[in-house]
Image (cartoon, rainbow, N blue to C red):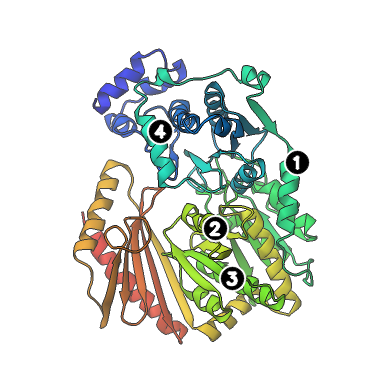
Amino acid sequence: MNYKDKYNSWLENDYFDEETRLELRQIADDKEIEDRFYTDLSFGTAGLRGKVGAGTNRMNIYTVSLATEGLAKTIVNKGKEAMNRGVAIAYDVRHYSDKFSQIAARVLAANGIKVYLFEGIRPTPLLSYTIRKLDAISGIVVTASHNPRDYNGYKVYWEDGSQILDDIADEILMEIKNIKDFSEIKLMDLDEAKNKGLIEYIGKEIDDDYDKDLLSLSLDDDIDKDIKIIYTPLNGTGNIPVRRILSKRGFTNIIVVPEQENPDPNFTTVGYPNPEDVKAFDYAKVLGKKEDAELIIATDPDCDRVAMMVRDKNGEFKFINGNQAGVLLVNYILSQRNRLNNIPENGVIVKSIVTGDLSKSIAKKYGVETIETLTGFKNICGKANEFDKTGEHTFIFGYEESIGYVYGTMVRDKDAVNTSMLIAEMAGFYKKQGKSLLDVLEDIYKEHGYYKEKLISIVLEGIEGSQRISRMMEEIRKRPIMDFDGIKLEKTIDYLLDNTGNPKSNVLKYYLEDGSWYAVRPSGTEPKIKLYIYSKDINSKVSEDKINTIESAVLKKINSIE
């Protein structure tokens, strides 16, 4: 069935509600119709993510119910015990998040599966925690994380509290493919499901348990708790949990950006609500200067990612990128645990293959191994799950350059609530020593070398964009750049073709003879191709110049591919 046939089938089938069909009738542009129906919104290990709207390639109640029916059948196949253990569901502030979570709950209930549904918005890491706390078989969080406002998404977790890996995703996908028509999807009335005890609402008791366990992760209390911090949740789910944990931790000088305090699915003040982008800090910087603050913390809409800015000696706020924040956290955690003499003998730091190597040098100083995985916390926390079974290592800290971090194992996903607490504690600890986090970062560079990094994302939307990204990857794979102003290519790793010990993935990594390297990969959740560039030198400027040389050569090649 081509896209026009699919479009007409939705228009003519009264299974779809009138609001959906009216939206479709109002589309005048054939290109728009094609984009909505040329494919089905794909279900993978990241679940679903796409623009909200009517169509098979959009996030709507029908695509959500289809994915949930696939999940339900997968759980039913595992037997009555799995069904009774149930599924925890959380959702964020985005358009239709509450509606999508209710649809998912009703589908699961109709299949005889117990559901634990949060009564209001919650951060994504709390969903991971809740699965483990309630011993649920699975979990769902309805969120598009830091995507633009017209997106939403649906992530599936498994019993260990981390996002599903390929084995479970493949089972769910097989069940989805076996559903020939939307009318096959079971759906129970919400009130009926509640009356039958199949849907149970989760109250604040889980929040309280989460806070208690988070506070147990603090490393030092001999800190300056009066440090002045600006916090922005970027109109997302972080406002209440982050402020609550900082208050319980004893920080008394937290000022919230008022325009970005409350939930706003349109993200009116920020547009692209990703704190990885320094423009997301515009409001916070103004407030920070007005209040003479020392630190700014920003969390993304579902509060699993966090970034910061630190005031320098000139009173300006300097952005700390994801690699630098990870380095500061690794250094603080390991130095503190070394002081407390409780670094486990088999402890490890886990990071992604496109994250910088400075933390590896720090970890080595403390006798801690670093393990690398493919991008995504399903892989990073997948190691924690693996260590639970093998006992081979103890998971200390996991992170990736895209501002995701987790300390400890109570949550099996990136956790911006946990990390916000650690950032505040770390800043307060060094302030008491007369240092800012910028001073600490410079000390680390002087000891280990100037590691520099740059991330470049090229957005290419739609069918044409997707096809061009494929051509780019193929050309770079077949004909790599061999020389960068005299610095030769030394080694290539192709994670799609080579035996790396990781699952196959469309990532290319190129090591140069001077220790610099770069990697190229398509984003798994956004219409982007990403270029990661890393260098190292004992001289800061030389290291920066290497970044510029690599960037110029690789972008010239990428942009020449039509």
- Point out the tag, 2 or 3, that comes first from the N-terminus: 3
Residue 294: x, y in percent? 69, 68
Pointer 3 residue? 330
Which quadrant would residue 21 be assigned to in this image? top left
Tell me how many marks there are: 4
Which quadrant would residue 514 be assigned to in this image? bottom left
As shown in the figure, which amino acid type bears the numbered disc 1?
A: Glu
Numbered mark located on residue 205 in the image: 1
Bin the neighbour count of mark 2 within 10 Å (Cα to Cα): few under 14, some 14-19, many 20 and up: many
Residue drawn at (29%, 46%), measured in percent from left and top? Answer: 466
Q: Is residue 289 visible?
A: no
Residue 387 left/right relative to 228: left
As shown in the figure, which amino acid type bears the numbered disc 4?
A: Arg
Residue drawn at (32%, 49%), measured in percent from left and top? Answer: 460
- Point out the tag, 2 or 1, that comes first from the N-terminus: 1
Between marks 1 and 4, how big is the CA–CA gap? 35 Å
Numbered mark located on residue 58 in the image: 4
Look at the picture and state if 490 lies above or below 554. below
Q: Are marks 3 and 4 in contact (CB under 8 Å)?
A: no
Residue 403: x, y in percent? 53, 60
Between marks 1 and 3, how big is the CA–CA gap? 31 Å
- Say what secondary structure mark 4 lies in: loop
Q: Are marks 2 and 1 in contact (CB under 8 Å)?
A: no
- Say what secondary structure mark 2 lies in: helix
- Say what secondary structure mark 3 lies in: helix
